Image (cartoon, helix red, strand yellow):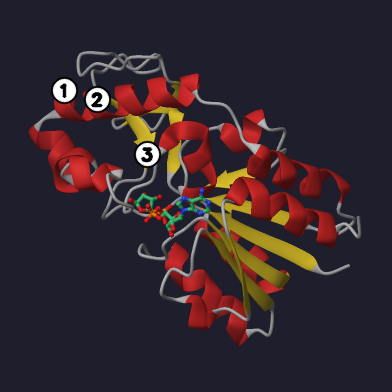
Amino acid sequence: MDAIFILTGAGISAESGLGTFRDKDGLWTRYDLRRVATPEGFRADPALVHDFYNMRRQNCLEASPNAAHQALARLQRDYPGEVTLVTQNVDDLHERAGAAEVIHMHGELLRALCAACGHRWPAPARMLPEDRCPACDRAATRPDIVWFGEVPYRMDEIVERLARARLFAVIGSSGEVYPAAGFVEEAVSQGARTVEINLEPCGRGNLFGSGLYGPASAVVPSWVEGLLGG
Ligand code: APR
């Protein structure tokens, strides 16, 4: 059975109210990413960065998965072959929709990380610069988020699974940020079928063998239905 590799981006959570980064009034039109999403920004003003992720964590807790998240969980459950679900998103909506194995290559809002000892634990609703690590007791906690300039998580596993994929799909991503943006070229180079699923062609559509356009909550369930032969 053909292995399927799916990469999701902020667009899949847009209809759950979490917004995106680069659409009009997206997060990066309202916040300076250098100040809130880089190690340098965190060093310069940890309180500002914690406030930014505390706000996003609150929004995440108040949001609900939409039909697109639920359809991907159904695909993972019912498809007889391997389904790899990699997300650039840091929300937990895939998990709350029932997805079993989600690879968060950019980290997770609901986890905290100790910059001193590497310990990870469930993030409290509000993180503060003076919080102490539950393992080493040093005041070196940070959101478990991969910032610009840092290395995405689980890349070895991602590359290995991508190499096996016979069908590659990107859902709700502008394809602006590497290494995720480069996955499609890798998939094409090894002969996988590729599909871009987005509100509209995101300017790199020519890299994909096919495209499905419209709101993810409408397009993804019908795409999954087709894959399951429904
Ligand atoms: N349905 C499907 N796609 C949508 C919807 C929707 N309802 N709404 C928006 N989109 C699409 C947009 O057309 C756009 O192509 O989602 C995409 C969002 O793009 P970005 O805002 O750039 O988000 P993303 O691609 O996930 O960003 C990648 O950049 O800032 C970093 O770490 C951050 O993980 C993020 C990475």
Residue 210 percent location from the top left of the image: 63, 77
Instruction: Please identify the quarter of the rendering in which residue 192 is found.
Output: bottom right
**Mark 1 CB lies closer than 8 A to ligand 1:** no
> In the rendered image, which quarter contains the N terminus?
bottom right
Q: In the rendered structure, which disc, 3 or 2, sits on the residue that comes first in sequence?
A: 2
Residue 48 visible in the displayed image: yes
Crowdedness of circle 1 by 10 Å Cα count: few (<14), some, many (20+)?
A: some
Pointers 3 and 1 in contact (C-beta within 8 Å): no
Residue 208 percent location from the top left of the image: 57, 78
Q: Which mark is residue 145?
A: 3
Q: Which mark is residue 50?
A: 2
Q: Residue at 35% of width from left, 65% of height from top?
A: 176
> In the rendered image, which quarter contains the C terminus?
bottom right
Crowdedness of circle 2 by 10 Å Cα count: few (<14), some, many (20+)?
A: many
Q: Give the amino acid at mark 1.
A: Ala
Residue 179 percent location from the top left of the image: 42, 65
Pointers 2 and 1 in contact (C-beta within 8 Å): yes
| Nearest the eye: 156 or 122 | 122
| Nearest the eye: 8 or 11 | 11
Q: Is residue 142 above or below residue 132?
A: below
Residue bearing the label numbered 1: 47
Q: Give the amino acid at mark 2.
A: His
Q: Residue at 65% of width from left, 41% of height from top?
A: 69
Q: Give the amino acid at mark 3.
A: Ile
Q: Is residue 102 left or right of residue 81?
A: left
Q: In the rendered structure, which disc, 3 or 1, sits on the residue that comes first in sequence?
A: 1
Mark 1, secondary structure of its residue: helix
Q: Is residue 106 above or below residue 224?
A: above
Q: CA distance from mark 3 to mark 2?
A: 11 Å
Q: CA distance from mark 3 to mark 1?
A: 15 Å
